[in-house]
Image: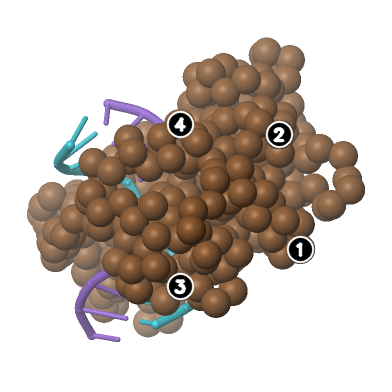
Chain colours: A brown, B cyan, C purple
DNA sequence: GATCCGTGGAT
DNA sequence: TATCCAAGGAT
């Protein structure tokens, strides 16, 4: 028994009409098309990030910057601070650049190729915005689509080599109309039914057409390469306080936590430990250490405090009032370190 | 193609 | 606790 690609698309769209998630950036059924600004902003936030994590940030960004033109006029520093905690900070840097490009253009481009030129929009996001915001037919392939397609056709070639085949199959499935709904339906299915570990095949509208289901072990697909172990790194951070303010620095624009406000540290990276030398002489007190897991390294960061020392901080930075530290926009690692320093103060 | 780039929740 | 992994992009 074989279902045609048109059958599969129709089954999925019918399922979506009944079970679509109600998400803040989506148009409600019957509403006019969604706001391209909302679609773009949500898609960038959702890159490698869960819906639950995105929701409060999406609301905050819309409250701060209700249109792409307003966002384009925002200082980089404010946008970076608002992004703090969401991770992958190059997204925030590119977000501002893209907003300014869109403002200069007088609005969002509506075609996939033009969207693809905006910073921060790769193959996936350009296709998603073209399809969802502008109703264009575009082949939208994210990790959900990869998983669903790999299972539907029991594609046994491991990732990433299988991507060419997966894209070809996804192209065949993508309908000429409702491409945006189709893409979101695939993602809802992948996120709620065709999940990575224990897929809910009994609830799946495509189970009758699924080759992996027929084989009996759908969770075997897609085949993934083994992961590398994360190295363990050690670093030190310096909590320098004077007159109720702490000395904060700005990290370099590229690299880990690039462009973010931070505590001074000893130069740790994912590749090597920090040097461990305090930036100035004084009576340092060890507060303790925080553990943090990045994509490709684990870090133990020791936090040392120097309160009301004699010397001025030797590196560029700014005094930040302790009672307003939550507005500094510290990424999570340094927010943890600050919390530790305050708790042991 | 391989590597770098965060974070928090689920299992 | 350890591991996986989530609406990926840039280099």
Dot 2 falls on a residue whose secondary structure is loop
Q: Chain of mark 1?
A: A
Asked if both marks, 3 and 4, belong to the same chain, the answer given is yes
The residue beneath circle 1 is: A18
Residue A197 found in image quarter: bottom left
Asked if both marks, 4 and 2, belong to the same chain, the answer given is yes
Instruction: Give how far apart the Cα atoms at labels 4 and 1 are.
Output: 29 Å
Dot 1 falls on a residue whose secondary structure is helix
Residue depicted at 84% across the width and 52% down the height: A29
Q: Position of residue A187 (x, y in %)?
A: 56, 54
Instruction: Give how far apart the Cα atoms at labels 3 and 4 are.
Output: 27 Å
Q: Nearer the viewer, residue A227 or A280?
A: A227
Residue depicted at 66% across the width and 31% down the height: A176
Q: Chain of mark 4?
A: A
Asked if both marks, 4 and 1, belong to the same chain, the answer given is yes
The answer, for residue A5, to whether it is visible in the render is yes
Which numbered disc, 3 or 4, marks the residue closer to the eye?
Answer: 3
Which numbered disc, 4 or 2, marks the residue closer to the eye?
Answer: 2
Residue A273 found in image quarter: bottom left
**Mark 4 or mark 1, earlier in chain:** 1
The residue beneath circle 2 is: A177
Instruction: Give how far apart the Cα atoms at labels 1 and 3 are.
Output: 19 Å
Which quarter shows the C terminus of chain A? bottom left
Which numbered disc, 4 or 1, marks the residue closer to the eye?
Answer: 1
Q: Position of residue A22 (x, y in %)?
A: 75, 61
The answer, for residue A320, to whether it is visible in the render is no
The residue beneath circle 3 is: A199
**Mark 3 or mark 2, earlier in chain:** 2
Instruction: Give how far apart the Cα atoms at labels 3 and 2 are.
Output: 28 Å
Instruction: Give how far apart the Cα atoms at labels 4 and 2 are.
Output: 20 Å
The label on residue A123 is 4
Instruction: Give how far apart the Cα atoms at labels 2 and 1 are.
Output: 18 Å
């Amino acid at each position: 028994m074989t279902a045609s690609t048109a059958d599969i698309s129709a089954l999925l769209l019918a399922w979506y009409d009944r079970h679509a998630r109600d998400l803040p950036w989506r148009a409600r059924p019957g509403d006019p098309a969604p706001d391209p600004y909302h679609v773009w902003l949500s898609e960038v936030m959702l890159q490698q990030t869960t819906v639950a994590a995105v929701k409060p940030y999406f609301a905050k960004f819309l409250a701060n910057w209700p249109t792409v033109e307003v966002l384009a006029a925002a200082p980089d520093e404010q946008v970076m601070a608002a992004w703090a905690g969401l991770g992958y900070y190059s997204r925030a840097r590119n977000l501002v650049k893209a907003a300014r490009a869109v403002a200069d253009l007088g609005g969002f481009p509506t075609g996939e190729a033009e969207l693809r030129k905006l910073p921060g929009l790769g193959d996936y996001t350009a296709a998603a915005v073209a399809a969802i915001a502008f109703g264009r037919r575009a082949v939208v392939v994210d990790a959900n689509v990869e998983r669903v397609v790999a299972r539907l056709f029991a594609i046994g070639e491991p990732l990433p080599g299988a991507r060419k085949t997966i894209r070809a199959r996804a192209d065949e499935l993508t309908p000429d109309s409702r491409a945006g709904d189709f893409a979101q339906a695939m993602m809802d299915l992948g996120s709620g039914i065709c999940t990575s570990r224990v897929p809910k095949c009994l609830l799946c509208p495509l189970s009758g057409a699924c080759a992996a289901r027929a084989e009996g072990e759908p969770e075997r697909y897609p085949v993934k390469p083994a992961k590398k172990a994360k190295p363990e790194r050690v670093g030190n951070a310096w909590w320098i306080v004077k007159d109720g303010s702490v000395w904060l620095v700005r990290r370099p624009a590229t690299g880990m936590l690039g462009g973010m406000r931070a505590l001074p540290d000893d130069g740790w990276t994912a590749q090597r430990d920090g040097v461990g030398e305090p930036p100035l002489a004084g009576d340092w007190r060890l507060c303790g250490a925080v553990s943090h897991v990045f994509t490709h390294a684990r870090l133990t960061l020791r936090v040392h405090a120097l309160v009301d020392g004699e010397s001025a901080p030797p590196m560029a930075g700014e005094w930040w009032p302790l009672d307003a530290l939550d507005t500094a926009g510290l990424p999570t690692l340094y927010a943890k370190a600050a919390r530790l320093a305050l708790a042991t103060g």
